[in-house]
Amino acid sequence: MKKLLGITLSLCLILGLVSMAGAEDRLTINGDFRVVGYYKQNAGNVESDNDVSYFDQRFRTAFNFKFSDMVSGIIRADWAESIWGIRDNLGPFPGPELGTWADGTDTILPVLQIEQAQATLSKPMFDLTMGLGWVVPYGFNDVWRPYGHGFDLRLKLPVMVQLSAIKWDENGTASPQSAGPGAFAVDGEGAEDWNDLSLQVAGKVAGWQIGGFYATRMNGIDEVNPSVIEVYGKGQLGPVSLGAGLDYFLGEHADGVDAVGMALYVEARAALTAAATVGGHVYYNAANDDDTKQSYRQLYVNGPAPSHFASGMPGLTWDGVGYEAGFAGRTAIGVNGDGTDPGQMGLDVYVNYKIGDFTLGAQVYYFLPVDGDLTDLTSLMGIDAGVQYSLAPGVWVALGAIYDAPSGEDSYDPTATTGVQGAFYIMY
């Protein structure tokens, strides 16, 4: 009864806000509905007699409010996000985190998830956003993409200065809301906070955006603080859009284990014709053979991070953004279980081509370990392709396929993964 009451009250609140804002013409609504089907053979490059096939769906609605010329807000709701064939749980609102289903257990999925509830105050000198949601962008948006409750302050100076703070945990209380009155009253030994902090500075130099940021996860509960420093640049060189980022990871991963790592990421994209676009990426991550040092390639990323299985399929969307072929492969060759890291160097090249209502995309990629002595994997190559057909503005279907083939030493016999996926999308 309490679960249903909570859902009912929350729905009434949203509908009330919609009615109030709509009456004054201060509301815009957008979102998407998707159904995606997957089929994978030898998923994860492991030979298996059991193929993987499933569907997932999501109905997303974003309520964008304009309270005044200076104050705006957003509430984003996901309705009945689920994997077909797994029983859903209708509460408690807003619901628990997504469970696991790979081992056959039931995944608990809420009927409604509120993933964003923010308000923004815009003034001539600054923008201040507060509430639950995302703080973006930082650099190339692939190493540090924080999410949670907090604020983001952007100063409108000759250079852009961005400061964000997200609070995960206060005084070591896992669920302070359920701890009752006085949960925040004591701050002593063993009662430490967990906060995510970041600072970015960027500006324009000869038409190029040059910047850098520092971000840290200050987890006082476990007494660790892995951090990252990135310097980056983005700009145009003739018809080619270029960008590069250099990352350095530091801090402490665990008791007696340091956070380390260095990475270089380069991207390029150019329109060959009005219909054809070609691009690619180059990657390098330093190797690490010390089990007292934990390698990092991303500090914390929440949200869109397309895997290479989905990369070549036009029509793939995440958070309302349509992707074409092209992906970021920072973790193509993984880190060993003991923390040692063979590192990786590699590249991908992709092309997108539009023919009327059709969009075609294809991609090839190839990776090598920096230090072959730290892994039995000698290389990873793959090819994927897809086609999207527009049924109407904002409505499309898509089909894609992939062949992902690692190779290894005699003692390591990986198996190629093959798969197809189909999708139906409505963007509104």
Image (cartoon, rainbow, N blue to C red):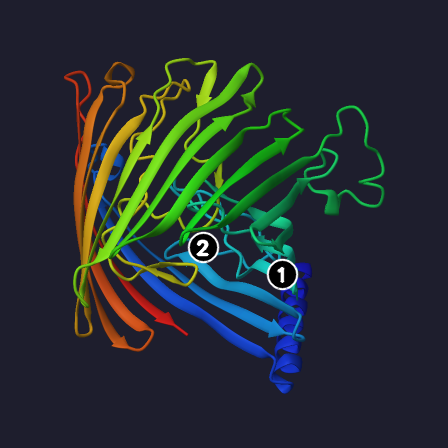
The secondary element bearing badge 1 is classed as strand
Q: Mark 1 against mark 2, which lies toward the viewer?
A: 1
Name which residue lies at 55% across and 37% down: 215
- Say whether residue 38 is visible: yes
**Number of numbered labels in the structure image:** 2
Q: Residue furthest bottom?
A: 23
Query: Residue 255 got which mark?
Result: none
Is 320 positioned to the left or the right of 385 in the image?
A: right
Decide: is 339 above or below 108.
above
Residue sitting at 19 percent across and 28 percent down? 379
Seen from this angle, which residue lies furthest front? 206
User: Which mark, residue 87?
Assistant: 2
| Residue under the point 29% across and 30% down | 333
Of residues 323 and 210, which is closer to you in this image? 210
Residue 151: image x %, image y %? Answer: 65, 51
Whichever of callouts 1 and 2 sits on the residue coming sooner in the sequence is: 2
In this picture, residue 169 sits left or right of residue 268: right
Residue 395 at x, y percent in the picture: 31, 73
Q: Where residue 118 is drawn, which disc sits there?
A: 1
Residue 231: x and y, percent? 45, 38
Q: Which residue corresponds to the image point at 24% horizontal and 57% vertical from the top-left?
A: 239
Query: Which amino acid, mark 2?
Result: Arg
Inspect the image, locate mark 1, and give the three-letter code of the amino acid beneath it.
Gln
Task: Say which of 154 and 391 sits in front.
Answer: 154
Quadrant including the N terminus? bottom right
Position above or below: 93 against 227: below
Disc 2, SS: loop
